[in-house]
Image: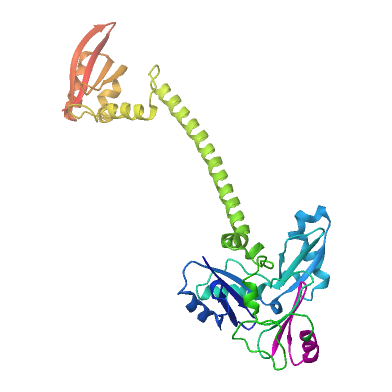
Amino acid sequence: MNRCWLIIARNGELTWQLTDSVGSCQQGNWQQFANAMTDVNALDITAILLPDLYSIHQLSFIEAERKLLSKTVAFSLEDSLAEDIDELHFALGAPAEGVIDVAVINRQLLQDVLDSAAHVGIDLDNLYTCPTAPGEQALIALNESEVLLVNGMQSVVVAYHSLKTALATMAEKDIPTYRLCQRSTIPAGLALSESRTYLDQLTQLTKLGIDLRQGSFRKGIAWENYWQLWKMPAVAALVLIGLMIAQSWWQLGLLEDRNLAYRQTIEQVYLKAFPGSRVVNPRQQMQTKLNALQGSGGGNGSNMVSLLAALQNSPIGAELEISGISYEARAAELRLDVLANNFQQVERLRSDLMNKGIKADLQNSSAAGGKVRAKLALSEV
């Protein structure tokens, strides 16, 4: 896989070079870089920020603190930083014996770099600080007016005209002096001690700087950022849903209790109305019984209620004593046992009912003790 070394400056100027194209670098903006990368397949981009975008700090720690460094390092460095720690991003290097290097960069600045790359379709898997070694010193000419001064883990970009004499003196000594890449212009009067460029040197490195893509900037955890943003509303929504479900179950339990009491009441009413009956579905059984009493299932449409009303409204019927009454649903007949003073009263009742459209068949009669007992079967004509 081809590797591309990409150097990012504060002003958005980029310098890049492929590993297999040592000595041949290109410079431009993000769009020009993206256009150049479209012609290269299976590209592995190693991005490096120049040190004017961040600072490196060394922090001492005890072994008991090792596992907590990612959470405590910001507070440990707070007094030595000019900005509020909430506005800064802290990236940890590999811990040594009781010492760890920490890269500190403004969060918004780092986000702007990543957004600029994403805007042109470049997804940076990593974003390193400038690789340096303990005790290493070097001068890197970035352009005709700026020089990168590397001194161990500390690096700084300085204006050449401000420190011209000091930088020239350093260059005259055994301090390696490079230009950034072959196309980089160098300040007048600055002597290069190395024919290689800084990019050429990077391609030979096996150990890189501190990867700034840590914590909330770690690649592939955008969903975690969204989760942090929506965690409290989501938890509140889940609690609310849980309460609603619990309330629904509670209300369902109440309804079931009320339904059971309602069914028990229906059964009691049904058994009072029809003692000794077998209860299966009391409500349906009650409706069937009522339909039968009203004659809705009769063959000729007889109606028990209308038959009783006709009997009640008959003045002759009021003179008689009704000793028994039943309704035969299949025959649609209201059957009466009456007790009259004489047989003529029974006949007048039959005649009166016939006039009302009620057929009254005399099924049998008998006389005893000065009274007449008769059984009548009433039905609608």
Quadrant (top left, top right, bottom left, bottom right) of the C terminus: top left
Residue 328 placed where, x, y %?
25, 20
Using the image, determine if residue 101 lies above or below residue 9: above
Q: Does any portion of residue 308 appear in the rendered image?
A: no
Q: Is residue 264 shown above or below 10?
A: above
Q: Left or right: where does residue 210 sit relative to residue 60?
A: left
Indicate yes or no whether the magenta region holds residue 158: yes
Looking at the picture, tell me which residue is in the foreground, 253 or 325. Answer: 253
Is 19 displayed left or right of 206 in the figure?
A: left
330 over 283 or under it: above or below: above
Q: Quadrant of residue 226?
A: bottom right
Choose between 201 and 70: the one closer to the eye.
201
Q: Is residue 63 left or right of residue 366?
A: right
Q: Which residues are magenta?
A: 145-171
- Can you give x and y, in whole percent of width and height, for residue 250 in the image? 56, 40
**363 sits to left or right of 177:** left
Residue 27's quadrant in the figure?
bottom right
Is residue 378 among what the camera can see? yes
